[in-house]
Amino acid sequence: MRLRSLLFVPGDRPDRFAKAAASGADAIILDLEDSVRPEAKDAAAGNVATFLAQPGGAVLRLVRINPLDAGRLDADLAAARSADGIVLPKAEGAASIRQLIERLEERGPPILPIATETPAAVFALGSYAEVADRLLGISWGAEDLPAAIGAATSREEDGRYTPPYEMLRSLTLFGAHAAGVAAIDTVYPALADGDGLARYAARAARDGFTGMLALHPAQVPVINAAFTPTPEQVAHAQGVVAAFAASPGTGVLRHEGRMLDAPHLKQAQHLLARAEPQASSATPRDRSASQ
């Protein structure tokens, strides 16, 4: 299952649900949190429940609920009952995941925590490996934490993250890989800056993220392209794998003028895994139920 692009759509805009689902995104995130005004949250929950009651297509349908302490957990989980996954904002490590699991019916859908939105969350990024079997991936955000600590911004004037938030991005990346789940980079908020988005997404793929959050359907093709290996990359990776297969037991070999060893083989195998189309339409929830 590929999770290259995950597109947010406000839960109080049901007119946008079908368009989001047809955008080409690997997943849509029906949002009940930040994009919905407090007075519209009940209506948004109803909209989401109605949409999820309809047959879905190839796109995964996730629901971002409100924080665990917001007083809306029962209503949000009722709305998300038929979702393929739950996005948990303000998550603070494995303890938050366990708290949510206790409220889910039976096995429940997999969970995607937004893992850097409170000061305490930063110190719990290494704990997600404890609950990896319940995770869809791990993502992060660079907006809530600056507000929580009174920082002026998380970005430099040229759009780069300031050092504290660059650190958070790195910790999320390694926390996700330590847990063995998808590492999902955060949104690129400058909607009109297509070139900047392409550079940001390419950097995320280069650094080891496996996908990215999106705010608008127009961002989806750019993100998908960044996280889809090119034919040239696939051909090179296939050559590396074939070279090692032809020399079993060899730790180091020469290929296309370069010396390669085990890390190069592992990189090639990871790239080929990302290049494969989605092997099955079954969600993690479906697969866990059959185990």
Image (cartoon, rainbow, N blue to C red):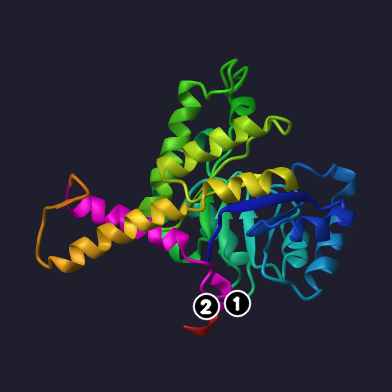
Q: Secondary structure at mark 2?
A: helix
The secondary structure making up most of the magenta span is helix
Q: Residue 124, relative to residue 105: is it above or below?
A: above
Q: Would you say residue 275 sits in the magenta stretch? A: yes
Q: Nearer the viewer, residue 112 or 93?
A: 112
Q: Nearer the viewer, residue 36 or 259?
A: 259
Q: Which residue is mark 2?
A: 287
What segment carries the magenta color? 259-288
Name the side, left or right, on which 226 lies relative to 258: right
- 10 Å crowding of disc 2: few (<14), some (14-19), many (20+): few
Give the farthest residue toward the front. 256
Name the side, left or right, on which 265 lies relative to 225: left
Q: Secondary structure at mark 1?
A: loop
Q: Amino acid at mark 2?
A: Arg
Q: Amino acid at mark 1?
A: Glu
Can I make out residue 107 in this image? no
Pointer 1 and pointer 2: residues touching (CB < 8 Å)?
no
Tell me, for residue 82, which label it has, or none.
none
Question: Rounded to the nearest whole Å, what is the CA distance between mark 1 and mark 2?
Answer: 14 Å
Sequence-first tag of 1 and 2: 1
Foreground disc of the pair 1, 2: 2
Tell me, for residue 106, which label it has, or none.
1
Q: Residue 151, relative to residue 28: is it above or below?
A: above
> Residue at coordinates 46% horizontally, 83% vertically from top-left?
291
Q: Would you say residue 11 sits in the magenta stretch? A: no
Q: Residue 21, relative to residue 186: is it above or below?
A: below
Q: Position of residue 221 (x, y in %)?
A: 65, 49
Can I make out residue 218 in this image? yes
